[in-house]
Amino acid sequence: MYPHIPVLLHEALAYLEPARGGVYLDGTLGMGGHAEAVLRAGADTLIGLDRDPQALRIAGERLAPFVRKDSASASGAQTEETALPAGKQIWLRNSPFSAFEAVLKELAPDGVDGALLDLGVSSLQLDQAERGFSFLRDGPLDMRMSAEGPLAHSTPHAMELIETASFEELRKIIAEYGEEPMAAPIARAILQARNSGIAGTADLARIVAEAYPAKWRATARRHPATRTFQALRMAVNREIQELEAFLSHIAHWLKPGGRLVIISFHSLEDRLVKQAFRDGSATCICPKSLPRCVCNIKPVYRVLTRRPLTPSSEEIAANPRAGSAKLRAAERI
Ligand SMILES: C[S@@+](CC[C@H](N)C(=O)[O-])C[C@H]1O[C@@H](n2cnc3c(N)ncnc32)[C@H](O)[C@@H]1O
């Protein structure tokens, strides 16, 4: 059993259509749950990216039984007898998905038949106290998805961010990424506390909770630190910037008829995806006052989801993490 349950799995497969075969890019491999399903459903080649080497190791072992004998996968592991459909080509890379073009230039220069992003952190990352993602477990203020390996050094961890940010920078991060109404008092409390040192995630959670008015604290449905932790994690990993970079280039790497599926967990992310699909599917951007079209825009997408898909109440009951998920899909024209 893997600690991460893939979110909106059937819906993602329905739009990706891996039964057609071909090459699929999973930009957020994680535990490989979606990737395994894509391979089982018929994809011939899977290119999986993750910033987290630990995720790549786990996914590598999980996907090894699919590997074709001559395919040089990251894990290299192969098994002789398996009930899984073998003969696949699997390439796993420790890379942010913003850098997907460099990987595809090498491995799939003709483009891909489908691409998937399942954003955010995995349950495995959340559950490990030493990664510092969760206020429920005491750990160091790290929060880097790439806490080890070559990408680790280029990402400042959460403590460095807290120690160097100005009040306004911290307030903005907490307000925008956390959508936190109490961003200003929380930023002030963190800045005050950092002079004497913040011991770790439990200490930060306490500082944030104490910045909340007592009345709010007593009636809140969620821990008062939920939004602040999410905001810091998104800032540390530059999650919005990563998504923007991916969205600005992926259309050109999808083959005609190729499918793009993005599962997001944050309104800012969903808005970016919606906007990218809207821009990519526009047939004319001329001002309405012009008698005829002069922009000659060529749409690159046919949007497949007019509204985002959300998980059923059964899925949320079985996997509460799915609660805020939104799936959007588009087809390359
Ligand atoms: C929600 S999990 C994916 C779970 C996966 N779909 C599964 O079924 O097991 C997200 C994964 O994407 C990775 N990730 C998040 N942002 C990334 C980025 N910008 N580049 C590469 N990997 C990223 C995280 O490290 C994490 O392992």
Image (cartoon, rainbow, N blue to C red):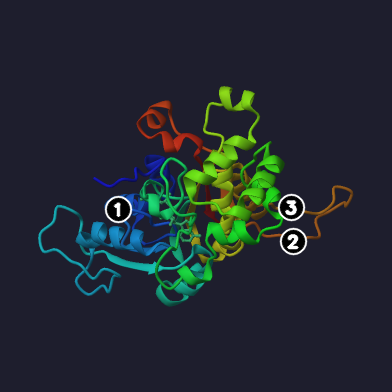
Ligand 1 sits in quadrant? bottom left
48 left or right of 294 in image: left
**Tag shown at residue 168:** 3
The residue carrying mark 1 has its beta carbon less than 8 Å from ligand 1: yes
Q: Residue at x 39, y 57 (%)?
A: 29
**Tag shown at residue 296:** 2
Which circle's residue, 3 or 2, is located before the other in the chain? 3
Q: Quadrant of residue 220?
A: top right
Q: Crowding at label 2, few (<14), some or many (≥20) Cα neighbours within 10 Å?
A: few
**Tag shown at residue 309:** none
Q: Is residue 251 above or below residue 171?
A: below
Q: Position of residue 65 (x, y in %)?
A: 19, 60
Which circle's residue, 1 or 3, is located before the other in the chain? 1
Q: Position of residue 21 (x, y in %)?
A: 33, 58
Q: Is residue 310 above or below residue 125?
A: above
Which amino acid lies under the numbered mark 3 shown in the image of this protein? Glu
Which amino acid lies under the numbered mark 2 shown in the image of this protein? Asn
Front-most of residues 326 and 242: 242
Instruction: State the residue lying farthest toward the front.
Output: 196
Instruction: State the residue lying farthest toward the left.
Output: 81
148 left or right of 244 in image: left
Q: Position of residue 25 (x, y in %)?
A: 42, 61
Mark 1–mark 3 Cα distance, whole angstroms, equals 43 Å
Q: Quadrant of residue 280?
A: bottom right
Looking at the rendered image, the disc whose residue lies closer to the viewer, 1 or 2, is 1
Which circle's residue, 1 or 2, is located before the other in the chain? 1
Which residue bears the numbered disc 1? 36
Front-most of residues 314 and 180: 180
Q: Residue at x 67, y 60 (%)?
A: 298
Front-most of residues 198 and 27: 198
